[in-house]
Image: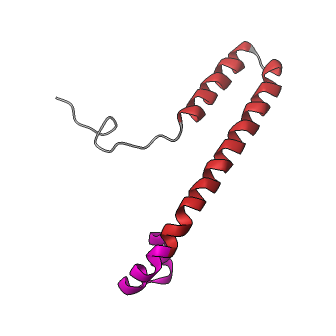
Amino acid sequence: MSDMLSQMVSLTDSQKTQLQPYFNTVQPQLDAIHQQERQAEAALLKQLYSSIRALLTPEQQIKLNAFEALRAAGPVEPKFGEGFGSVSE
């Protein structure tokens, strides 16, 4: 958050140092809010999937299961230099 704000309003190094305690105080609270939002979203999606599952064909249910598994695994971070575009001998 501090980096984004710093770039947006062009903070000086002195201002960054002075403002860092404020960012340090607020960041855990923001993290907690984001975690609560993720949990609420997950619960709502689980309820939705449970409600619609009976209306899906077996093939669609398999796809939904795969989608749920991907979401449960969380975001995937790309690893540069591995896989796509790498040179193998």
Task: Tell me if residue 32 comes above or below residue 41 in the rendering.
Answer: below
Does 24 appear above or below 82? below
Q: Is residue 89 left or right of residue 10?
A: left
Where is residue 16? Give x, y as percent: 41, 80
Position of residue 17 in the picture relative to residue 89 (left or right): right
Residue at x 62% of width, y 29% of height: 67
Residue 30 screen position, x and y as percent: 59, 60
Q: Residue at 82% across / 27% down in the picture?
A: 51
**Residue at the image point whose x is 59% and y is 61% from the top:** 29
Name the one closer to the observer, 12 or 7.
Answer: 12
The quarter holding residue 12 reads bottom left
Residue 75 percent across, percent down from the top left: 51, 41
Camera-nearest residue between 34 and 54: 34
Q: Which residue is at the front of the view, 60 or 37?
A: 37
The question of residue 17 being in magenta is answered with yes
- Residue 18 in the magenta stretch? The answer is yes
* Magenta stretch, overall SS: helix
Tell me the quarter of the image containing the C terminus.
top left
Residue at image position (44%, 70%) is 3
Task: Spot the residue most to the top.
Answer: 58
> Residue lying furthest left in this view?
89
| Residue 1 visible in the shown view | no
Q: Is residue 17 visible?
A: yes
Number of dots carrying numbers: 0
Give the residues drawn in magenta, as a range: 2-21
